[in-house]
């Protein structure tokens, strides 16, 4: 995961930027509107408590998959015909609970070995949008229907990107996509996490038990941190952001709010787990369902970790194609969800 800590005055003390943001916001409330501080803290605590069971299940799921070595299943998606690879990569990308950092060495190795860019693009587009823990968090914040629709859109993203690249694969746009200085290591993840066969009864091996415990702790802290930030922002937004303004900009019918949601999704996106409760708050304030879907999907593809993973490996023209496909996919998904919801 990305290091969000800062070194305090060179003394070796590290403070997480996310906690600094949370503390700064609460201090701001205490200084400017002290009467609202208790309400903000209380609302944040209640929101965390109401999603506690979802957080716990998400933590257990990702720790179990890591401990068993289920990542090795992903490699099966990149065998066979190009069409088969695109379809499976799109499906696996939306189900694999792996960080963008882990994807870097895997994708670099695939491209270096000559795996078609179409399959890699399908996996790349789908991977940051959805995974099992994110499905759980999204369900708790925006409802199961929204989470299911987002999952379907995730597969659709992969198919759109994969088959688009396949159709243009022989053009100059996608010729020699890999950067000359790209390599299969250096991201800090160690060995390729996508090799080997899963061991479902992991508790029989002490090393896997340790992996389970460390992964559970890391992800519990990770989710708690980002959801705390999300709920603090949501509480502030509900109190101080005029609902009429949000409804006028991102509410209503038509293409406009959906396009705007896709445009602001990237720069405004903090984290996939934090985005769900934030968007839930925006929907309560008047954001349209279509804009909510396009915001979350565009933000997932263009968020910093996902974008860096792509930029680090491919040439700028391929990177721009990645962002363009993400924007187009977000618009299509937003329009589709607006029509259905």
Image (cartoon, helix red, strand yellow):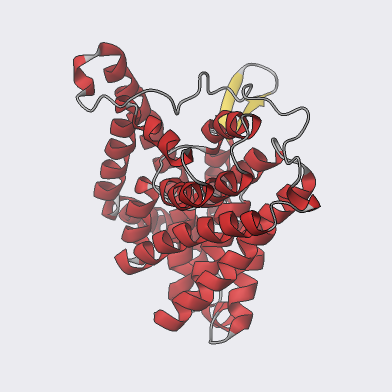
> What's the residue at 48%, 39% (across, down)?
78
Q: Is residue 321 left or right of 188 when viewed as pictured?
A: right
Total number of numbered labels? 0
Vertical position of residue 171 compared to residue 150: above or below: above
Q: Position of residue 124 (x, y in %)?
A: 56, 46
User: Residue 104 falls in which quadrant of the image?
Assistant: top right
Residue 33 in view in this figure:
no
Give the residue drawn at x 65%, y 45%: 307
Q: Residue furthest front?
A: 81
Image quarter of residue 231: bottom left
Query: Could you tell me which residue is drawn at 45 percent across and 50 percent down?
Result: 273
Measured from the top left, where is residue 33 in percent x and y?
54, 61
Left or right of residue 163, residue 323 in this image: right
| Residue placed most toward the observer, 341 or 324 | 324
**Left or right: where 281 falls relative to 244:** left
- Residue in view at x 46 percent, y 49 percent: 84
């Amino acid at each position: 995961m990305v290091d969000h800590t800062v070194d305090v005055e060179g003394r070796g003390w590290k403070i997480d930027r996310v906690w600094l943001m949370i503390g700064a916001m609460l201090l701001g409330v205490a200084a400017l509107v002290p009467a609202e501080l208790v309400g903000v803290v209380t609302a944040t605590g209640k929101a965390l408590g109401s999603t506690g069971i979802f957080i716990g299940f998400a933590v257990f799921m990702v720790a179990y998959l890591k401990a068993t070595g289920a990542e090795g299943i992903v490699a099966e998606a990149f065998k066979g015909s190009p069409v088969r690879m695109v379809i499976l990569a799109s499906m696996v990308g939306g189900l694999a609970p792996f960080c963008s950092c882990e994807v870097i060495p895997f994708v670099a190795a695939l491209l270096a070995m000559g795996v078609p860019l179409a399959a890699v693009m399908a996996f790349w587009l789908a991977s940051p949008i959805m995974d099992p823990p994110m499905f759980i968090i999204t369900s708790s914040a925006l409802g199961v229907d929204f989470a299911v629709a987002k999952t379907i859109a995730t597969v659709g993203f992969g198919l759109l990107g994969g088959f688009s690249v396949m159709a243009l694969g022989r053009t100059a746009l996608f010729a020699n996509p890999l950067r000359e200085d790209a390599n299969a290591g250096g991201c800090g993840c160690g060995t390729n996490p996508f090799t080997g066969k899963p061991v479902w009864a992991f508790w029989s091996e002490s090393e896997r038990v340790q992996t389970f415990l460390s992964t559970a702790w890391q992800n519990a802290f990770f989710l708690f941190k980002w959801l705390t930030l999300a709920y603090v922002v949501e509480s502030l937004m509900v109190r101080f952001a005029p609902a009429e303004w949000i409804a006028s900009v991102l509410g209503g019918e038509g293409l406009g709010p959906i396009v705007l949601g896709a445009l602001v999704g990237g720069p405004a996106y903090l984290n996939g787990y934090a985005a769900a409760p934030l968007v839930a708050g925006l929907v309560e304030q008047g954001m349209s369902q279509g804009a909510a879907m396009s915001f979350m999907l565009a933000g997932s593809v263009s968020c910093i970790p996902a974008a860096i993973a792509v930029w680090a490996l491919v040439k700028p023209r391929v990177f721009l194609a990645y962002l363009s496909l993400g924007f187009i996919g977000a618009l299509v998904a937003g329009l589709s969800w607006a029509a259905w919801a």
